[in-house]
Image (cartoon, grey):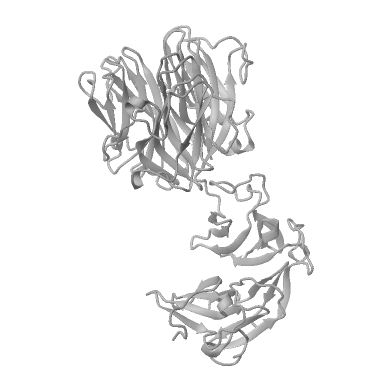
Amino acid sequence: MDWVSTPSFLVPRDVDIDPDGNLIISDSLNNRLRQLTRDGVITTIAGGYSSSGGNIGDGGPLQYATLLDPTGVAFSADGVMYIRESTRLRRVDHDTITTLASGFIASGDIAVGSAGDVYVPDGNVIWRVDTLGQKTLFAGVLGGGGSAADGVAASNAVLDGVYHVAIAPNDDVYFSDFNSGRVRKVANGIVTTVAGGGTVRDATGCMPATRPVRVPAQGLAFSPEGDLVIAAAKLVRKVALTDRPCPSMSAITPKRVLETRVAEGQIGFTGPKPQSGQVVTVHLGVAGSVVPADATAVALNITVTNATVNGYVTAWPCEAERPRASNVNVVVGQTAANSAVIALGDSNDVCLFDHAGGDLIVDVTGYIGSTTPYQPLVPYRALETRPAEGQFHYIGNKPVAGQIVRLPVTGWGFGSSRTVSPFASAVVFNVTATNATADGYITVWSCAEPRPTASNLNVTLGGTVAHLVISSLSEGSVCLYTQSGADLVVDILGAFAAESPYVGTTPSRVLETRVADGQIGYQGGTPAAGQTVEVDVLHSNLSVVAQTARAVVINVTATNPAAPGFVTVWPCGTPRPVSSSLNLSASDTQSNAIVVGLGAAGKVCIYTQSGTDLIADVNGIFA
């Protein structure tokens, strides 16, 4: 039984599971070994007779032994327990404790290989102790203190701060080279880096483990699936040692799932043009080959045309109540389109509220699977600057030219289905600008970064335009800059977690066809009617992160069209889909944010039906 009536831990340093499934905990500064049973009972199994430390008890029962700063515990395959203390390694076999080896100078945990050898990290070296107590230097150089380790024999590796070790299923030895900020392994006697040592500042997102600059591991273990689990920098990360892709946004060649126009051949709808106030249901479950049953969200391009009144369209999962939000805003008789990432319920149905009373066209451009760390939310309003609509997260007159509005995103909400996680790394918005004072643009970015020289929305005097925006989130807030002055409305659609495959980038221009503005990724005159422009995303001026991209978030702008028409964006190397990404009037300027997969050789294709100048900015990637 426990000699303390209410057990409390004082710097527990290591844990392992005994053959009976109990959790064994090294309670280092209490000088005790604790046992936590499956039914939640805690007892002291060693050190209970003295809390002042010591190493008395060799040759006797474990329960009567005293311990001095136990920092590691591990079990061999045959159930023998090993305990790491301040200067020595002890073994417990059939409840009898003995000292197996001594002379260690630094604290740390331990691990046991399949042959029963115990690996003991000790400052700048790792010792291997066999079942007879023979201690040999396994890795590192005595005295050590450096990071000259990769590609050399373990016995010649210069290490700096080795405190944690784990054994892989194939008996490779993994360890933390803490002061170097790396996790390394010894395989066939040679040391290599497994995590850390890269060029990326923060180890966020699903990425190669060697990309972050530092991974200062404070604990290592292997999962039942054989993945390496690392505790570092207040996060627990997993490294898949087999070649597995990151779960990501699955971008597909756009597929039309709704068409209400009779003349174009109705799809997913029968009857006359939807009336103002009508709700149209898009049955994505019917298109099972496009959106799998376990998808949690879907990327759509929504177009409204032949609007009866000035109005809007709202999209949401049919299981939820219709939100106070909009995805597309349109003027009577006109055509407008916008992208949206919409959460999916059990039915995989998306509802569209047609306030404008226009024909509706919906194309699926991708989906998010159940394994992707994405938080799909029922859309909710996060910013409203118009007094007549009830200002929210804003007080004052309409934002003026040059004004920056700061929007807090985390730390508030309307229940779990409408609250962004405080651990979110990026947020999916629908941003609307209306009542513009003059022609201009809106830029959205993470407030922790400098304002980029790019736009997310282009607005005209007195006009209204809405766009999908996916913005990085590093301090819980995003900033919105209005160049010409306009009211701003923001609806939140979802959020990506820190370990998600989405990487927000400073908007980078990859295509500019206008000669006067300096052509980028293109040479020649204005793209003609029927022309397809290929955008070489992977070999553009983006950072190296884009080289692993499977899909991108690209903001495409069409300007100076020769005639009314449309623009289609899709992955090169696949047939051009029967869909539109932008719809244009003569001499119009329109833009839309699109999630598109990278096609052959990392290229995105843009088709212009009527001939127009094209501009494309990449705002983020899905690895």
- The vertical placement of 213 against 42, above or below, is above
Q: In percent of the image, x 40 and y 74: which residue is there? A: 38
The part of the image, by quadrant, that contains residue 86 is: bottom right
- The vertical placement of 64 against 498, above or below, is below
Q: Can residue 19 be seen in the rendering of this structure? A: no
Which residue is at the front of the view, 147 or 49? 49
Q: Can residue 523 be seen in the rendering of this structure? A: yes
State the image coordinates of residue 356 (x, y, percent, origin top left): 28, 20
The part of the image, by quadrant, that contains residue 220 is: bottom right
Q: Is residue 28 left or right of residue 464?
A: right
Q: Is residue 387 left or right of residue 355?
A: right
Q: Quadrant of the N terminus?
A: bottom left
State the image coordinates of residue 559 (x, y, percent, origin top left): 50, 13
Q: In percent of the image, x 54 and y 87: which residue is there? A: 62
State the image coordinates of residue 427 (x, y, percent, origin top left): 46, 38
State the image coordinates of residue 541 (x, y, percent, origin top left): 64, 29
Residue projecting furthest to the left: 271
Residue projecting furthest to the bottom: 60
Which residue is at the front of the view, 267 or 340? 340
